[in-house]
Image (cartoon, rainbow, N blue to C red):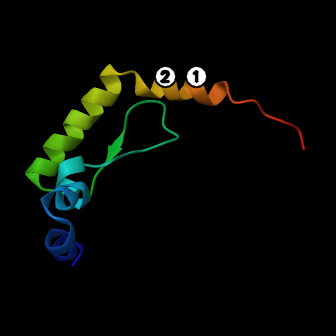
Amino acid sequence: MIESVAGAELGGAARRRLDASEHGGALLAGVRGVVIVGHGRSSARAIERAIELAHRFSSDQLVDRLERGIAAIPVSAT
């Protein structure tokens, strides 16, 4: 349903943004490392994109950067 609405009203770019196979999955927060969670019925394309995403996050040291960023947030006592 979303695909038909996005395709008809918003065009191909919106369809690609909403297409789960274009993203592959989502980063699982709270895990020390890169973990990508995908849908159980992911297509081969979605799995390929999830692997690419995990590689990019790992190469960019995303987890380390997130840890440093969170640690730098001041905590105030209320």
Are circles 2 and 1 on residues that touch, CB within 8 Å?
yes
Which of the 4 image quarters holds residue 77? top right
* Rendered view: 43 above or below 67: below
Q: Amino acid at mark 1?
A: Arg
Residue 42 place in picture, x, y as percent: 18, 57
Query: Relative to the observer, which residue lies in front, 57 or 74?
Result: 74
Report the disc number at residue 3. Answer: none
Q: Amino acid at mark 2?
A: Asp
**Which quarter of the rendered picture does the C terminus lie within?**
top right
- Residue at the right extreme of this rendering: 78
For the residues marked 2 and 1, what is the alpha-carbon distance in whole angstroms? 6 Å
What residue do we see at 43% from left, 44% from top?
A: 28
**Which quarter of the rendered picture does the N terminus lie within?**
bottom left
- Residue at the bottom extreme of this rendering: 1
* Rendered view: 51 above or below 14: above
What residue do we see at 25% from left, 60% from top?
A: 18
What residue do we see at 31% from left, 20% from top?
A: 59
* Rendered view: 32 above or below 78: above
* Rendered view: 57 above or below 44: above
Report the disc number at residue 68. Answer: 1
Which of the 4 image quarters holds residue 13? bottom left
Q: Is residue 46 left or right of residue 37?
A: left
Residue 69 place in picture, x, y as percent: 58, 26
Residue 50 place in picture, x, y as percent: 23, 42
- The residue pinned by badge 2 equals 64
